């Protein structure tokens, strides 16, 4: 009996030998030494979820910029707090009496709900629903209700000169087509003015077009959006030889959406006497509703690293749970306190100010990220949704073209992150033995391409271990 106990104890000791004494530690150290771009830093943590023990660590308690890996934390909080079936809604409400001739003796409210997935086509469908309800004239006022969020469209620490780009939208309670417009310039007859098309088609954006078709003397093609001076003018100039498109984030995105809605009303033959902004009364009659589930919003957030979708989850979670108007400062406090209450992490391990990781004020440690990934792994219902929503190596999302060889394809489910000077990758690896590893790799002082090569080499080693 004693001999069996000794043998079992010996087996246990051998099976629990520290990874620091195993070949994998040497191999990973070698990768760090050889592949980490010179002049840069890395902070790394790897944990074996199957065995329940650490695999590798390097400066794992150093605070680093998470970049878009921040979206994993935003998703975990939203999913834990609201549930996968929570709906982001945009509503059309009617207040008053509808007369037999189609005149509404009252008001209409277009209520924004911080839905990042609302499209111009869906907005047009809401107008169709209003017409189907029998409304032909609004005798009162047409209102847009954007009161769910404050008027600050950017997060703290966002780069001001990123503003016109589609990846940094002007966030508001009411947006269509992700708060963006696409401008397309199409050549016509040689020497003639090129054609400019707006998607969605609208009269909100003013176009100044001096471009010329197939004329080198006109200079290089330029599409300039006057966002800096709060204008909504696009200036097109230069030589046009082929169809060219560019997307811009629209300043005053709620004004843009509301203007589109009014145009759609005109197109449908529904008149209104006045319009403006106002809060929707509690007692109304719903005419139309467009909604998108948190599960779908989260999938777009993680798979495609969509900043707008992340921020809408970040803001709406706090707004829904507290009942207070959505704003970045409140959402940051709420997220930090939620992570502390539910998971027990203090401020020394993270600093959260937005939901997407765009901010230069976001910081967290690899140890914190791996701990969060480990805790969610134990909550199987939540884990399965998160795991399926993460980009998959060589298959989809932002990892579609990375780690696509036979040894790694499909083995890594992880979130990428990239801002100037920082590159990150965090998620899960399934190795050859079937073990699931949680990992976080945070590079700083880097350019994107060399750091991604380092991360991919590191993950390949983990997958083959």
Image (spheres, rainbow, N blue to C red):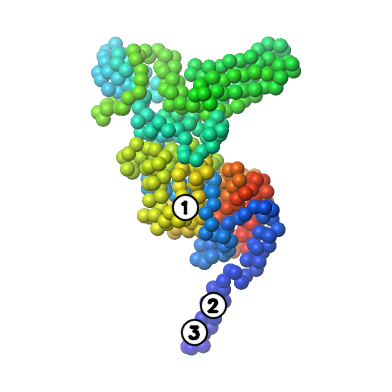
Left or right, 20 with respect to 96, comes to right
Few, some or many residues within 10 Å of mark 2 (<14, 14–19, 20+) = few
Label disc, if present, on residue 5 of the rendered structure = 3
Q: Of the residues under marks 3 and 1, which one precedes in the sequence?
A: 3
Any part of residue 347 in sight? yes
Query: In x, y percent, where is residue 290?
Result: 40, 31
Residue 11 x, y percent position in the rendering: 54, 78
Say whether marks 2 and 3 touch (CB < 8 Å): no
Q: Secondary structure at mark 1?
A: strand
Label 3 or label 1, whichever lies nearer to me, is: 1
Q: Is residue 29 above or below residue 312?
A: below
Residue lying furthest right in this view? Answer: 216
Q: CA distance from mark 3 to mark 1?
A: 45 Å
Nearest to N terminus: mark 2 or mark 3: 3
Instruction: Name the residue that disc number 1 marks.
Output: 350
Question: Which residue occupies 68% across, 14% down?
Answer: 212
- Image quadrant where residue 115 sits: top left
Of the two numbered discs 1 and 2 on the same chain, state the one appearing first in sequence.
2
Q: Are marks 3 and 1 in contact (CB under 8 Å)?
A: no
- What residue is pinned by disc 2? 13
Per the model, the C-alpha gap separating discs 2 and 3 is 12 Å
Where disc 2 sits, the SS reads helix
């Amino acid at each position: 009996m004693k001999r069996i106990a000794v043998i079992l104890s010996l087996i246990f000791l051998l099976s629990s030998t520290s990874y620091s004494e195993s070949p994998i530690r040497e191999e990973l150290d070698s990768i760090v030494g050889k592949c980490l771009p010179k002049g840069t830093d890395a902070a790394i943590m790897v944990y074996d979820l199957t065995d329940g023990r650490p695999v590798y660590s390097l400066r794992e308690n150093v605070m680093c910029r998470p970049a878009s890996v921040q979206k994993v934390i935003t998703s975990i909080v939203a999913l834990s707090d609201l549930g996968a079936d929570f709906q982001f809604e945009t509503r059309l409400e009617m207040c008053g009496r509808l007369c037999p001739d189609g005149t509404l003796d009252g008001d209409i409210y277009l209520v924004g709900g911080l839905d990042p997935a609302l499209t111009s086509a869906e907005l047009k469908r809401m107008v169709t629903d209003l017409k189907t309800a029998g409304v032909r004239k609004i005798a009162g006022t047409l209102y847009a209700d954007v009161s769910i969020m404050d008027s600050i469209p950017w997060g703290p620490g966002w780069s001001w000169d990123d503003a016109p780009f589609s990846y940094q939208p002007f966030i508001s309670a009411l947006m269509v087509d992700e708060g963006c417009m696409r401008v397309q310039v199409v050549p016509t007859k040689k020497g003639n003015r090129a054609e400019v098309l707006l998607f969605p088609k609208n009269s909100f954006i003013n176009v100044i077009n001096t471009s010329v078709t197939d004329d080198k003397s006109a200079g290089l093609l330029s599409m300039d959006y006057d966002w800096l001076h709060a204008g909504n003018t696009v200036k097109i100039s230069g030589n046009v030889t082929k169809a060219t498109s560019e997307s811009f984030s629209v300043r005053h995105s709620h004004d843009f959406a509301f203007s589109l809605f009014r145009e759609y009303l005109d197109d449908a033959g529904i008149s209104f006497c006045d319009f403006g902004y106002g809060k929707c009364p509690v007692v109304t009659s719903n005419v139309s509703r467009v909604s998108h589930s948190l599960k779908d919003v989260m999938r777009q957030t993680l798979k495609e690293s969509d900043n707008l979708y992340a921020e809408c989850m970040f803001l709406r979670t706090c707004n829904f749970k507290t009942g207070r108007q959505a704003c970045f400062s409140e959402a940051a406090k709420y997220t930090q306190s939620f992570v502390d209450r539910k998971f027990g992490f203090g401020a020394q391990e993270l600093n959260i100010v937005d939901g997407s990781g765009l901010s230069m004020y976001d910081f967290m440690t690899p140890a914190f990220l791996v701990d969060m990934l480990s805790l969610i792994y134990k909550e199987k219902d939540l884990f399965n949704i998160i795991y399926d929503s993460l980009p998959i190596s060589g298959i989809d999302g932002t990892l579609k073209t990375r780690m696509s060889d036979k040894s790694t394809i499909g083995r890594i489910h992880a979130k990428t992150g990239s801002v100037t000077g920082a590159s990150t990758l965090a998620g899960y690896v399934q190795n050859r033995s079937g073990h699931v590893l949680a990992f976080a790799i945070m590079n700083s002082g880097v350019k994107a391409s060399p750091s991604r090569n380092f991360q991919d080499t590191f993950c390949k080693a983990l997958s083959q271990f």
